[in-house]
Image: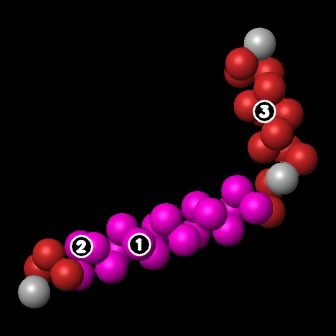
């Protein structure tokens, strides 16, 4: 049931999830850069 709900919500708000994914990727990259310096 949980899996079905997850797929359902992801398909309905796919663009939002993509934006969140991009933001999270950017944050990770920024953190990596900060750690290197």
Q: Is residue 13 left or right of residue 35?
A: right
Q: Is residue 19 left or right of residue 10?
A: left
In the figure, residue 6 lies in which quadrant? top right
Q: Main secondary structure of the magenta part?
A: helix
Residue at the image point whose x is 27% and y is 73% from the top: 31
Residue 34 position in % (x across, y down): 19, 81
Q: CA distance from mark 3 to mark 2?
A: 31 Å
Is residue 37 positioned above or below 8 on the image?
A: below
Q: Nearer the viewer, mark 1 or mark 3?
A: 1
Residue 12 position in % (x across, y down): 89, 47
Is residue 35 positioned above or below 11 on the image?
A: below
Q: Provide the secondary structure element on which disc 1 rests.
A: helix
Is residue 4 positioned above or below 17 on the image?
A: above
Q: Of label 3 and label 2, which has the lower sequence position?
A: 3
Label 1, on which residue?
27
Label 3, on which residue?
7
Q: CA distance from mark 2 to mark 1?
A: 9 Å
| Range shown magenta | 16-33
Q: Which residue is outermost to the left?
A: 37
Q: Which labelled disc corresponds to residue 32? A: 2
Quadrant into which the N terminus falls: top right
Q: Provide the secondary structure element on which disc 2 rests.
A: helix
* Neighbours of disc 1 within 10 Å: few (<14), some (14-19), many (20+): few
In the figure, residue 22 lies in which quadrant? bottom right
In the figure, residue 35 lies in which quadrant? bottom left
Q: Which residue is outermost to the right?
A: 12
* Neighbours of disc 2 within 10 Å: few (<14), some (14-19), many (20+): few
Residue 23 position in % (x across, y down): 54, 71
Residue at the image point whose x is 80% and y is 26% from the top: 5
Residue at the image point whose x is 84% and y is 53% from the top: 13
Q: Is residue 30 left or right of residue 2?
A: left
């Amino acid at each position: 049931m949980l899996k079905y709900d997850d797929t359902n919500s992801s398909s309905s708000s796919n663009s939002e999830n993509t934006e969140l994914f991009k933001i999270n990727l950017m944050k990770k990259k920024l953190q990596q850069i900060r750690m290197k310096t």
